Amino acid sequence: MQQVQNESEQLVISRVKSWLEKVVIGLNFCPFAKKEFERQTIRYCLDSNKQQADSLSYLIDELALLDGDPNIETTLIIYPQNYQQFDDYLDWLSLASSLVESGGYRGIYQLASFHPDYCFDGEDVNDPANYTNRSPYPIIHILREASLSRVLNHYPDPESIPERNMAKARQLGVVALRKLMA
């Protein structure tokens, strides 16, 4: 994984948008992302706080912002300088999930996770399936559960999405996926 130092906010967001377009939307890993990407209802924000307490406050602020702005469908909080080690990121994700739960947001928002070194539990680190959740930077994706439920109700067999994505990633292979991520 590349260490990110002093990249401008605009460059970081540009890389994330490119990843969304080429990987998430291009490979149809998330069949719902294209609509929101085209409608420009995805909020991209960077958290470069050095202290976890500050990052927790940042997350609370983002949840409150979503509460107050129905025009934002979903938020990607990007951590260009923090949580570079996957285990550290998982610890942070656990803390963030607990905050969503204890903050009264259970059933309102859901967190999805992406990381440059993402590895599914029990899988080999080199398994191409890990690329379904790999991203250029550590990212927490805040989703509105009501919107997600509405979309899933109209999508045939939504439970098969993860397995289909993993199969597609394995079919493409690591070399092709790395090129898409570059």
Image: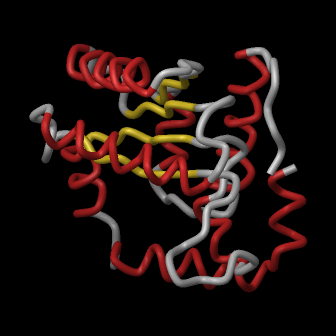
Q: Residue at x 68, y 29 (%)?
A: 81
Q: Where is residue 154 drawn, in percent x and y? A: 28, 63
Relative vertical location of residue 92 with respect to residue 28 in this rendering, above or below: above
Relative vertical location of residue 20 with respect to residue 71 in this rendering, above or below: below
Q: Residue at x 87, y 49 (%)?
A: 182
Query: How did the renderer colour the structure?
Result: secondary structure
| The image quarter in which residue 3 lies | top right
Q: Nearer the viewer, residue 50 or 177?
A: 50
**Of all residues shown, which one is farthest toward the left?**
104
Q: Where is residue 40 drawn, in percent x and y? A: 52, 26
| The image quarter in which residue 139 lies | top right
Q: Where is residue 26 drawn, in percent x and y? A: 69, 56
Left or right of residue 77, residue 148 in this image = left
Q: Where is residue 120 drawn, in percent x and y? A: 54, 73
Left or right of residue 144, residue 5 in this image = right
Relative vertical location of residue 26 with respect to residue 122 in this rendering, above or below: above
Tally the marks: 0
Q: Residue at x 67, y 30 (%)?
A: 80
Left or right of residue 73, residue 145 in this image = left
Left or right of residue 29, residue 169 in this image = right
